Image (cartoon, rainbow, N blue to C red):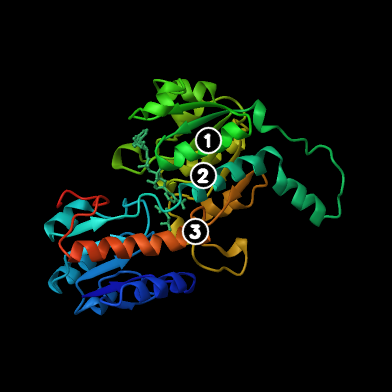
Amino acid sequence: MKIFAYGIREDEEPSLKKWEQANPDVEVGFTNNTLTADSARMAEGSDGVVTLQTSDYTREALEVLHNLGIKYISIRNVGFDNFNFQDLNDFGFTLTNVPVYSPNAIAEHAVLLMGRLLRRTPEFAQKIEDGNFTWAPTIGKEYREQTVGVIGTGHIGRVTMQILKGFGCKIVAYDVYHNPEIEKQGLYVDTLEELYKQADIITLHVPLFDSNKHMINDKAIEQMKDGVYIINCARGELIDTDALIKGLDSGKVAGAGLDVIDNENSVFGKKWSSIDNIPNEKIRNLAKRLNVIVTPHSAFYTETAIHNMITTSFDSNKSLIEGLKPDNIVNTNK
Ligand code: NAD
Ligand code: COI
């Protein structure tokens, strides 16, 4: 049996080596390249493909894999919004993800972004850089005074709530599906409007679908409290960046913590000579503000997460090749 993996980084190689040692019956090939129509040919002779990328998986790339006789694709991450399910099903692929590699990694990052905004750490860092070691006017706010609106109470949203509770925050939650544990605690509000009305901080933990693209738009921001903080560690396309910039300009939005931004692939994952040279005016605008913290889709990036992403994705791909049905199959071609 042979599995070919795309987008393998140096930091993943030790975990990959361990997996290979534990699975001597599987031949593993890999490349640092992402999966494109060109690189797809590298999987020739393989039974399955493991991959991770934030850019779209094109129909052309999937067609090449299909023509090589490959039926199984396992992504090493949670979100599968960069696949077109029609393409997957047209070519008969079965897709698995890694639904729970470490919700804590992302939840901790979201809560840190909140804390850094509340305590104005970018402003303090700038002051120190300028030789200004004074307090005023950089006064902070405390977690325990905040009502946090958690949108999406799945794996990551629930860990976020657990951590926030430890800090003494009041929590309100919204989800199309009501988790019984959260329901018991009486934390759900019925509508997003209600959450917007109550929350001092809003944090997004929902998958991206066509139906919720730009759910945070002018209208949503208008319904929020004055001085709201917005955190996005889910998907960039959930927020209309123009609306966010408008909200920040007017002061309606006091700050934002953004691990993901619409069209981030033009900037994230690459090294630029300076922030002034990044080729995306909106990301530049946001990243230069002291009340906005931008991180390069790195919320997931912990040692624990990387190890679990490799192990679960390869285990799943092997299971599919063996004719088993792991419970993390995500498309309808089950
Ligand atoms: P999950 O599937 O466990 O939870 C998602 C929750 O969102 C579910 O409870 C679902 O009912 C709810 N939901 C779906 N559509 C909704 C809608 N329109 N309105 C309200 N609720 C809705 O997923 P998760 O593991 O918590 O991950 C959430 C998202 O976080 C992923 O889909 C992915 O996009 C993102 N993510 C980001 C990173 C990162 O590094 N920044 C890492 C992992 C995941
Ligand atoms: C996910 O797991 O969905 C992420 O956003 C992490 C990223 C490496 C794609």
Mark before the other along the chain sequence, 1 or 2: 2
Query: Relative to 284, does residue 46 appear above or below in the rendering?
Result: below
Q: Of the residues tagged 1 and 2, which is closer to the observer?
A: 1
Q: Position of residue 167 (x, y in %)?
A: 63, 34
What residue sits 49% from the left and 40% below the top?
159
Asked if the residues shown at circle 3 and circle 2 are in contact, with their CB atoms under 8 angstroms apart, the answer is no
Q: Position of residue 203 (x, y in %)?
A: 50, 37
Q: Position of residue 239 (x, y in %)?
A: 45, 41
Ligand 2 shows up in the quarter that is bottom left
Q: Of the residues tagged 3 and 2, which is closer to the observer?
A: 3
Mark before the other along the chain sequence, 1 or 3: 1
Asked if the residues shown at circle 1 and circle 2 are in contact, with their CB atoms under 8 angstroms apart, the answer is yes
Q: From the viewer's perspective, is 318 left or right of 116? A: left
Identify the mark at residue 304; answer none if there is no mark.
3
Residue type at mark 2: give it.
Answer: Ala
> Which secondary structure, mark 2?
helix
Q: Quadrant of the N terminus?
A: bottom left
Task: Please tell me how crowded label 3 is: few (under 14), some (14-19), or many (20+) other residues with Cα within 10 Å.
Answer: few
